[in-house]
Image (cartoon, rainbow, N blue to C red):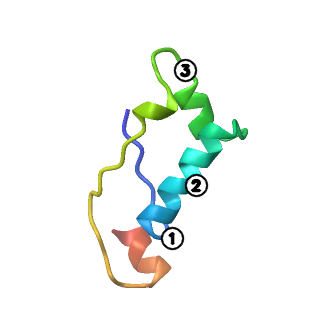
């Protein structure tokens, strides 16, 4: 499974938020995924597909 999303936050900030959601068992889609069979928070990883410098939300959505 591949998760693709755009965000204004830094990668570090976004990854910490996801990790906290799983650790604190917040009712979020990421918790449902990592509580599934054969998964755990320790399986979480990040891969950057593209990095952009433009601050425009429209530009991020187009990318």
Which residue position holds label 3? 36
Q: Badge 3: few (under 14), some or many (20 or more) residues near its Cα, within 10 Å?
A: few
Q: Residue 36 in the image: state x and y as whole percent.
A: 54, 20
Furthest toward the right, the residue is 27
Mark 1, residue position: 9
Q: Secondary structure at mark 3?
A: loop
Q: Is 48 rendered above or below residue 59? A: above
Question: Which residue is at a point 45% across and 84% down the rendered structure image?
Answer: 56
Q: Is disc 1 placed on a helix, strand or loop?
A: loop
Q: Do the numbered discs 3 and 1 sit on residues whose CB atoms are within 8 Å?
A: no
The residue carrying mark 2 is: 17
- Tell me where residue 63 appears, x and y as whole percent: 33, 68
Looking at the image, the residue that sits furthest to the top is 37
Q: Is residue 29 visible?
A: no
Say whether marks 1 and 2 touch (CB < 8 Å). Answer: yes
Towards the viewer: 29 or 60: 29
Q: Quadrant of the N terminus?
A: top left
State whether residue 38 appears in this view: yes
- Residue 2 coordinates in the image, percent (x, y): 37, 39
Question: Is 18 positioned to the left or the right of 4 in the image?
Answer: right
The count of marks equals 3
Mark 3–mark 1 distance (CA, rounded to whole Å): 27 Å
Mark whose residue sits in front, 2 or 3: 2
Give left or right: position of 52 versus 61.
left
Give the side of residue 37 with respect to residue 31, left or right.
left
């Amino acid at each position: 499974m591949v998760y693709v999303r755009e965000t204004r936050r830094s990668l570090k900030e976004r990854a910490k938020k996801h990790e906290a959601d799983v650790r604190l068992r917040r009712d979020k889609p990421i918790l449902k995924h990592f509580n599934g069979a054969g998964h755990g928070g320790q399986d979480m990883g990040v891969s950057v597909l593209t990095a952009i410098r433009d601050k425009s939300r429209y530009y991020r959505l187009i990318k």
